[in-house]
Image: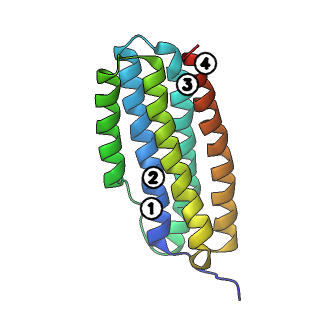
Amino acid sequence: MENNINNPEIINDIIKINNDRIEGYNKAIELAHNHGLHELEPDFRKYIDQSQSFIADLTPYMELEGKEPTDGTMLSGKLFRAWMGIKVNVTGNDKKSLLESCEKGEDAFKATYKKVLEEDTDELTPNLKNVLAMQLNKQLEAHDNIKMLRDNASL
């Protein structure tokens, strides 16, 4: 029997990781500007916009369950952003360090989505699972781009 309701806690966890990603890239833009790495901003802004779009896609599923989407973040995301700022400042303010931090954020994002899609499928409708799978595929492209930028930064 197919599930026809969604667990709003799971959706809010996905929204939180997107909020973390938005805040993480805002922090990355700030650090990039502080270190003269302005060329990274267009990519970072693209991923902020991407997560905002993901949240917009998820919001109707929350509303269907009679809940409001969160505007919060995960504690781990707050800790990650603080660590990212410290790491970039300590390791030489370089492009590679900043991109390594962004890649770690993308890894956390990917892990959250994969966990939901592998472990929580019985608490999601088929439509929402399809939305999450499409979002994950787009995020994997973003991850690969950040990784490529990082690899090229060390050349």
Task: Please name the amino acid that badge 1 sits on.
Answer: Asp
At mark 3, the secondary structure is: helix
At which x and y percent is residue 107? 52, 45
Task: Please name the amino acid that badge 4 sits on.
Answer: Asn
Viewer-nearest of discs 2 and 3:
3
Circle on res. 81: none
Determine whether 89 is above or below 147 in the image.
above
Viewer-nearest of discs 4 and 1:
4
Task: Kindly identify the residue that appears in the image at 51 percent across and 49 percent down.
Answer: 109
Rounded to the nearest angstrom, the CA distance separating label 4 from label 2 is: 27 Å
Rounded to the nearest angstrom, the CA distance separating label 2 from label 3 is: 22 Å
Q: Looking at this view, name the residue that lies furthest to the bottom.
A: 1
**Residue located beneath label 3 in the image:** 150
Residue 151 or residue 20, whichever sits in front: 151
Task: Please name the amino acid that badge 2 sits on.
Answer: Ile
At mark 1, the secondary structure is: helix
Ranked by sequence position, the earlier of labels 4 and 1 is 1
Circle on res. 13: 1
Rounded to the nearest angstrom, the CA distance separating label 4 from label 3 is: 5 Å
Rounded to the nearest angstrom, the CA distance separating label 3 from label 1 is: 28 Å
At which x and y percent is residue 73? 36, 52
**Residue located beneath label 4 in the image:** 152
Report whether 124 appears left or right of 102.
right
**Residue located beneath label 2 in the image:** 17
Viewer-nearest of discs 3 and 1:
3
Q: Are marks 4 and 3 in contact (CB under 8 Å)?
A: yes
